[in-house]
Amino acid sequence: MTHQDFPIDQILCGECVSTMRSLPSSSIDCIFADPPYNLQLRGELRRPDETVVDGVDDDWDKFTDYSAYDRFTRDWLAEARRLLTHDGTIWAIGSYHNVFRLGAIMQELGFWILNDIVWRKANPMPNFRGRRFTNAHETMIWAARGPDSKYCFNYQAMKTLNDDVQMRSDWYLPLCTGNERVKNVHGLKLHPTQKPESLLHRVLIASTRSGDVVLDPFSGTGTTAAVAKRLGRHFVGIERHPDYVEASRLRVDAEQPLSEEHAAVTPAKREMPRIPFGTFVEQGMLPAGTELCDRQRRLRAVVSPDGSLVSGGQRGSIHKMGAQLTGAPSCNGWTFWYFERNGELLPLDILRTESSQTKLRNAG
Amino acid sequence: MTHQDFPIDQILCGECVSTMRSLPSSSIDCIFADPPYNLQLRGELRRPDETVVDGVDDDWDKFTDYSAYDRFTRDWLAEARRLLTHDGTIWAIGSYHNVFRLGAIMQELGFWILNDIVWRKANPMPNFRGRRFTNAHETMIWAARGPDSKYCFNYQAMKTLNDDVQMRSDWYLPLCTGNERVKNVHGLKLHPTQKPESLLHRVLIASTRSGDVVLDPFSGTGTTAAVAKRLGRHFVGIERHPDYVEASRLRVDAEQPLSEEHAAVTPAKREMPRIPFGTFVEQGMLPAGTELCDRQRRLRAVVSPDGSLVSGGQRGSIHKMGAQLTGAPSCNGWTFWYFERNGELLPLDILRTESSQTKLRNAG
DNA sequence: TCAAGACTTGAATCGACAC
DNA sequence: TGTGTCGATTCAAGTCTTG
């Protein structure tokens, strides 16, 4: 395959493994994979109020037994490893139904696990029967192609995103709901397990550079592709179901990439601010690229994906940039910077007020 | 082995698998296992030649370290399964180094995973080199002996422990530090990975009953045994290292069991004495002829002297009539039907609550 | 227009027992 | 081993409806 043939920035319609085989080796910098979970559900589940839970009963999640699932898993993971560059990394997400098989096979194929990341769901489905603990998380395995990979980890950006303390292996994020959820023509959810964009935002900011090529072999509604495009990464999506392919192409087309300047993140050590400002960026409440100003609209700055601000070629936290631009020794960025909503100028601080005691809460 | 020979409430000094072989089948209600984490893999796994790792299928056998660990894991897990009663459960804890192998092998041996529980460490060690996310959690796999086990889960106790909302799969607990940490004669920590008692407390309260037999095949400093004794559970510990055995025997001897009264937890409603609805009619607390309605006051029914309800020419139990009038397959009449008292609409269930711990308690 | 309440929903391996 | 009966069981977010 020549360079021109490489299907960059596309959603490919086809079966996962065979489509991966058509791509050249060492061509992908990062893979995010959300494979079927191999749920083995026994029957209909009802809530205590007798309403029926719309669960996952799709054909793509049907496997006869563990060994069939293992074969499938080994196949696509082996292809994934071939496609990765020497220093590339892979993310694979799953629940207890499949994640142990995923992890064991990854180790056997030579991947080098870097972290297991726990996505703590802000609003999980309860356990209606009261027979187990609320299944309130999913697990992501983050691995390098091999033990000697010089993989990309934007440590400082992660630290900035988390109020200047190291980002931990447990992430607290809400499910994908509301307008973010891709709907079919009947207004119903198109895909049963669409992942939130905030999750992909953090994954891509953590482990890729601007211009990297990101592959999602189970592309679904195109969340990975959409977030990658927004953040200035190239993407390749593979999806079997034509309905998902069509919807994700529309979704990606509607996405606007941030300018290179605005997609950059904190390159070196910095100081930053208790609700981390980066959380609002990550969740799209104040998207990267948003322009902020002071109350008199004299000073301006633009929000970066890791929650830093850029203005006049300089970069820093909301506090530091406020202090720097005004020449003051210090500055409370939460009350100094304003953003516009519905023609109204609002201080950043209002974001914290609006979200207090809700999804951004991260306590024990 | 006769009943008298069963080494109840003891720490046995010996190798894990062979010592388990000396115990009788179906003798253990719950197992907590904290096996070696296989952290030493890095050196042996490092490969200078990338192409060797590339050959996927053929390389399986070359990962001798994984297969040695897997053999060991399969051996002790198979013994664990033999020792468990039909309705017994097992907890196994690990990190990303070994937990995927643990989980996959458990599934292959026939264990039925109930939850994966994330222990979120309140005070984890930071990642000093800034090359990864802070490894801030460990994973516990909770599994029944098989898919048809009628395992013990003290749902109400867990809910009470968590401020009256369902306990989730992510637990936030501090590491074992301070006086709880067992020290050697030099005042240094005796064991590198001593688990906090709070973790075992929650595990045992969740999944065992008073008087159950709890086994820890990797007993270490005896945390499982100590907490089990305190909570009125029997214990068996297996530990290879004589120093750990000695320290844990002293530790367990110093432990005082709570009185039966103080060790009790919120009972499941299933285990509360049943009070027939008719009892309340009989005793005049809800006289025959009383009109009931649903919460929206849309449906109505009248109480008969035998505790049946009548509505629209039909007659049945509180449950059956609720199901029939709503078209649902089933219905809990205790929470579906309401009656009026002093202008207030109250669910039938409140009658049971009000009368609990009184004379009706003996009616079941 | 706003506030309060009602309604909807999410990767879920989700009874026990008598006959 | 199947079938019917009894009865236990939900939380956080977001959207929609009503006053």
Image: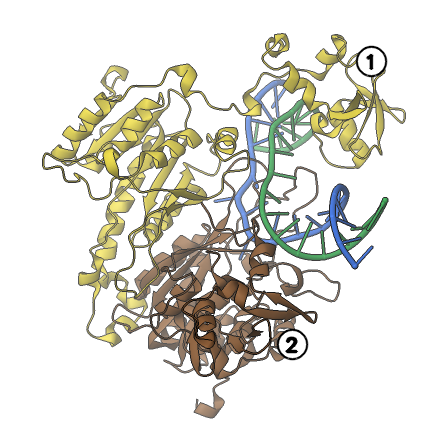
Chain colours: A brown, B yellow, C blue, D green
Please identify the residue farthest to the front as the structure is shown: A328
**Residue B27 can be seen, yes or no:** no
Q: Position of residue B155 (x, y in %)?
A: 51, 31
Amino acid type, callout 2: Leu
Q: Is B194 placed left or right of B232 in the picture?
A: left
Amino acid type, callout 1: Ala
- Are dots 1 and 2 in contact, CB under 8 Å? no
Q: Position of residue B101 (x, y in %)?
A: 33, 52
B355 w.r.t. A119: above or below: above
**Towards the viewer: A347 or B270:** A347
Find residue B288 and name its label: 1
Residue at 90% over, 24% down = B313
Residue for badge 2:
A250
Please identify the residue farthest to the left as the structure is shown: B186
Q: Is B209 placed left or right of A221 in the picture?
A: left
Task: Tell me how many marks there are.
Answer: 2
User: Where does the N terminus of chain B fall, quadrant-wise?
Assistant: top left
User: Where does the C terminus of chain B fall, quadrant-wise?
Assistant: top right
Q: Are marks 1 and 2 on the same chain?
A: no
